[in-house]
Amino acid sequence: MFTDEMLTARILSGEISAFEELVDRYKRSVFNIIYRMTAQYQEAEDISQEVFLTVYQKLYQFDSSKRFAPWIHRIAINTCISSLRKKNKVVLLNFDDSYANQLEPDQYQHYTDPDINLERAELKEEIKAALLEIPESYRSVLIMRYQLDLNNLEIAETLGVSKENVEVRIHRARKSLRKVIIKRWEERGRIDELPRI
């Protein structure tokens, strides 16, 4: 089986079948990243096609001494952000998956109190709404960290920045998100009811 780097060399020498194999390897992960950022299936498909076109056109820029996955995922994130900005789209992210990962199914049974369930559901909705108000760069690190479950080093490779830079971005993204949520609750005069976030 060819490595990604071997496939890129074959593509650059003119083997179209090697590019098809590369697309097969990455179409799911690229689509997942974009879908989580747009929450629109058709748009995610369109942007994914744009990503692979960009990959094909810029493959000569890929440094084969490095890993391919972070390179293509960076293109996916940048293409998605660029597309959203061009269309001035509102993005709704669903973080339900990340919450589901934190609690095993049988643990949900401990939360039989309807007030607790209502409070958790309300906070999830607040997070979704607040995500609309933070910058795309913050949104993307939160997706990679909490939805795609990448560690800080993997995010750093994907974004082409240092691990320390990722830690700072995640800290700022969470702080920004928290600030928006608190402001929304203060505006409704319900700040005393806000669970610890």
Image (spheres, grey):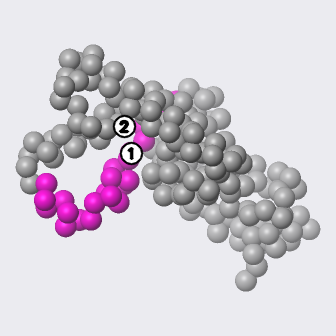
Q: First in sequence, mark 1 or 2: give its number.
A: 1
Please name whichever residue, 23 or 78, is drawn nearer the observer in this view of the structure: 78
Q: Quadrant of the C terminus?
A: top left
The residue lying at 75 percent from left, 70 percent from top is 4
Task: Tell me the amino acid under the disc marked 2.
Answer: Lys
Q: Which of the numbered marks, if any, corresponds to residue 78?
A: none
Residue 139: percent from left, percent from top: 51, 38
* Span shown in magenta: 89-111
User: SS for tag 2?
Assistant: helix
Instruction: Report the residue marked by disc 2.
Output: 128
Q: How many marks on residues?
A: 2
Residue type at tag 1: Asn
Query: Would residue 136 be found to the left or right of residue 67 on screen?
Result: left
Q: Position of residue 47 (x, y in %)?
A: 62, 46
Q: Residues within 10 Å of mark 1 (few under 14, many from 20)?
A: many
Residue visible at 45% across and 37% down in the picture = 174
Residue 73 visible in the shown view: no
Disc 1 to disc 2: CB gap under 8 Å:
yes
Residue 152 among magenta residues: no
- CA gap between label 1 and label 2 equals 6 Å
The image's mark for residue 94 is: 1
- Left or right: 87 in relation to 94: right
